[in-house]
Image (spheres, rainbow, N blue to C red):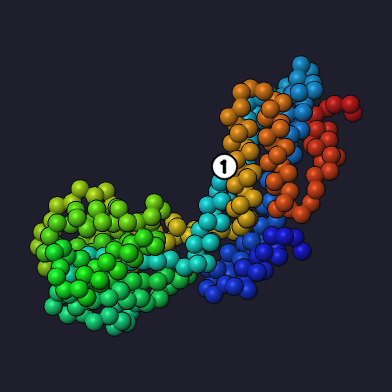
Amino acid sequence: MGISAVRGLDRLIRSRTEKERRAAFGQMRGGVRALEIREKLVGVLAKLFMILDFGEHVEVKFDEARQDVSEVLLEIQRLIRAWEGAERAQRGLNIVLYGRPNSGKSSILNQLAHDDVAIVSSIPGTTRDSLNTEIQINGVRCRLTDTAGIRRGVDDVIEAEGIRRAQKRLEAADVILVVLDPETRDPEELLNDVKEMKSSESRVIIVKNKVDLRLPYPDLSSKSHVVYSFATSSKGCEELRKHLENTIEEMCPEANFLLDAEILRKCADSLTLALLCPEDAGIMCGYVETALFDCVELTDRGIPTESVLDGIFNKFCIGK
Ligand SMILES: Nc1nc2c(ncn2[C@@H]2O[C@H](COP(=O)(O)OP(=O)(O)OP(=O)(O)O)[C@@H](O)[C@H]2O)c(=O)[nH]1
Ligand SMILES: [Mg+2]
């Protein structure tokens, strides 16, 4: 069993959803993709040796080798994104509802959870503390957090603590749903909080709730995606549900093959340097060789000198 298969098995044991299990099988199959990358890099090395040793007698161009390197690099970058998505899915995503009191955050949480998890009332300030529930979206476990409504100039110490906790939740959020209703005063202030507190990778979705009231919403300058909802009905949250599904699919894409991103990143760094180097087959050769040795860590197989020689003799009529 190769290293990828062993790590895939470990992922399989730890997996809790169908999607996590599929990712684990992808990692168990990952060695196959690693071998393909290894083959391609051996091919590039063979071309570079040809240019170095027999440049004047063969038709191989430096640009051809450069093109091959960028193709392998693109493939590796795709695999890195797939790995990052699988890791995100494995740890689960945090989705946080954020907005003014009475905008409909708790109602949205209940609709997304298909359950009466949070108390809903027409009294602003009903939710005093953060509240979590777990849901699955596209097979990804999501911790959905309802928070206290945000308003300024609060005297009540408990409400002030609820607001502080709500803002703190933004830091670890993968997806932030900023809930606005037609009554929302100064939505830019809310969006500034989000901008300041959120991590660079988290996604922001603006939810204009209570669309059934057919009242105008405050103007916004934000470029974040906007969806409309009416959270008094399950159907009224369909657009939000769909958009969340798409967002989560982008953040945790389905992958047929998974390979350890730490090693892939080393490989990608060497190939990036290979592409940055001037038109010098010798320098490029050095970086491609380093990438090949990194890649070997993923395959459990060495690179016998013969494989590079085979690469040369299979493609070019040298010494035959
Ligand atoms: N007409 C209409 N009313 C809604 C909608 N969503 C929520 N409401 C009502 O608005 C009121 C406030 O809803 P909540 O879900 O408690 O609002 P909240 O944002 O959690 O409020 P706080 O907990 O105070 O921060 C309740 O009376 C809901 O029934 C909607 O889409 N349309
Ligand atoms: Mg509430």
Confirm whether residue 169 shows in the render. yes
Residue 160 vertical placement versus 262 (above, below): below
Residue toward you, 195 or 153? 153
Q: Position of residue 155 (x, y in %)?
A: 14, 70
Which residue of the protein is positioned furthest toward the right in this rendering?
A: 320
Circle 1 packing at 10 Å, graded few (<14), some (14-19), many (20+), is few
Q: Quadrant of the C terminus?
A: top right
Q: Residue at x 67, y 69 (%)?
A: 9
Residue 245 vertical placement versus 136 (above, below): above
Q: Amino acid at mark 1?
A: Leu
Residue toward you, 153 or 24? 153
Q: Position of residue 284 (x, y in %)?
A: 67, 30
Q: Residue at x 59, y 73 (%)?
A: 14
Confirm whether residue 58 shows in the render. no
Quadrant of the image occupied by residue 75? top right
Disc 1 element: helix
Residue 162 lies left or right of residue 21; in this view the side is: left
Residue 306 lies left or right of residue 146; in this view the side is: right
Which residue of the protein is positioned furthest toward the top in this rendering?
A: 56
Q: Residue at x 49, y 62 (%)?
A: 88
Quadrant of the image occupied by residue 15? bottom right
Q: Position of residue 178 (x, y in %)?
A: 26, 61
Q: Residue at x 38, y 55 (%)?
A: 199
Residue 160 lies left or right of residue 4; in this view the side is: left
Q: Quadrant of the N terminus?
A: bottom right
User: How many numbered dots are placed on residues in this image?
Assistant: 1
Residue at the spot of label 1: 74
Q: Position of residue 17 (x, y in %)?
A: 52, 73
Queried on whether the Cβ of the residue with tag 1 lies below 8 angstroms from ligand 1, the answer reads: no
